[in-house]
Amino acid sequence: MDDQAGSRPEDTPVTIYQVAQRAGVGIATVSRALRGTGSVGARTRERILLAARELNFVPSRLGVSLAEGRHAANGIVFPSLTGPYFGEVLLGYEEAAAELGRSVIVVATDGLGSAQEHIRDLAGRVDGVVIYGRTAESDVVAELVAEHKPTVLLAPWADVDGPDVLTTENTRSARELTEHLLSHGHRRFTYLGGPTGGRDIDERWAALVGTLAAAGVPAPLPVPLSGYGEAELYVAARAVLADRGRPDAPDVIVCSHDEVALAVLLAARELGLTVPDDVAVTGWDDVVTAKHSWPPLTTVRQPMRRMGGMAARSLDELISGTRTTPRHEVLSTRPVIRESCGNHPQSSRR
């Protein structure tokens, strides 16, 4: 080994700075060459790789990140971490981030008095950020875009220019679900959980109303929620089911999420009602407990874990510079028919 390597003890790790010195380039160039990203000339890359081999250099994730002016971490922002839906999305995100060699900082904005400032602070400590729903206000998202902070929006409530956007399909699946309920003879619908002013739930609501109108069925009664806490869901479910003696009492309750539908199943049992004989119930998401409830819940399956994984990979592309143009992707969903809407018991095994 020549003098450029110095009189380094054998057990002392070689640094990226030593590789850069031997190759005669900057440390950022070494980092790009070793990661295979960015613009590095062929001869320069060969010189860097040769220097790394001669020095037996093993890149440190932190060292490479510092060389590129990065934090070796990215952030994801949820409104809450309660409930199975967010848990599945986060699990998919963390699995993909780990494969990509990135650590994750998670922020839940519920209960934060200055949520937007927390999001700004997070963005300053990470290489990129994923934001779910309406947790970040539009002006904060605009700031991130203006600062060229790699940003991915999951299920945003409105169209935003600049970041990557990942959403799921709502209209077709809601229409198919409504047509299935109509085929069972249901005519008195209640929609529990909206509309809310947010894109996902309101697209489902619009598809429900439009499909019923095409069939000559009156528009459903919409029942917004005051919140998604366990107590709030239970109170709303009891209120919807309370007066079964009314002639206009619903014969089917279409719920915005599985958590809402599971609260309805619980309230129905406590009130002595039988699902689906007295009232049918449907959800949306297909969380793990949906098929294990009694009766098993008819719902719409969303690719929650896949969405989280795609968000992590999309953010990695933006951070590494392998892609610079924003992308908008819509993931498919599909109805899963089980007994809670009156289907034959065999359907629960789907």
Image (cartoon, rainbow, N blue to C red):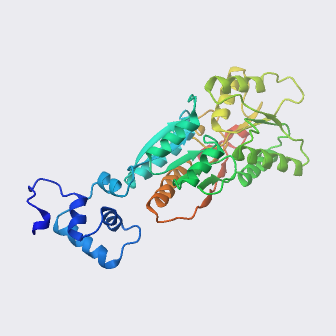
Q: Residue 19: x and y, percent?
A: 22, 64
Q: Quadrant of residue 36?
A: bottom left
Q: Residue 117: x and y, percent?
A: 55, 37
Quadrant of the drawing holding the N terminus:
bottom left
Kindly give the residue lying farthest to the bottom in the view shown. Answer: 43
Q: Residue at x 48, y 41 (%)?
A: 122
Q: How many marks?
A: 0
Q: Residue 336: x and y, percent?
A: 65, 48
Residue 346 visible in the current orientation: no
Q: Nearer the viewer, residue 156 or 244?
A: 156
Examine the rendered structure and indicate whether residue 123 appears above or below residue 82.
below
Q: Residue at x 29, y 54 (%)?
A: 63
Examine the rendered structure and indicate whether residue 257 appears above or below residue 240.
below
Give left or right: position of 121 versus 333.
left
Residue 192 visible in the current orientation: yes
Give left or right: position of 26 versus 142.
left
Q: Nearer the viewer, residue 173 or 44?
A: 44
Q: Nearer the viewer, residue 343 or 78?
A: 78
Q: Residue 94: x and y, percent?
A: 44, 47
Q: Nearer the viewer, residue 82 or 174?
A: 82
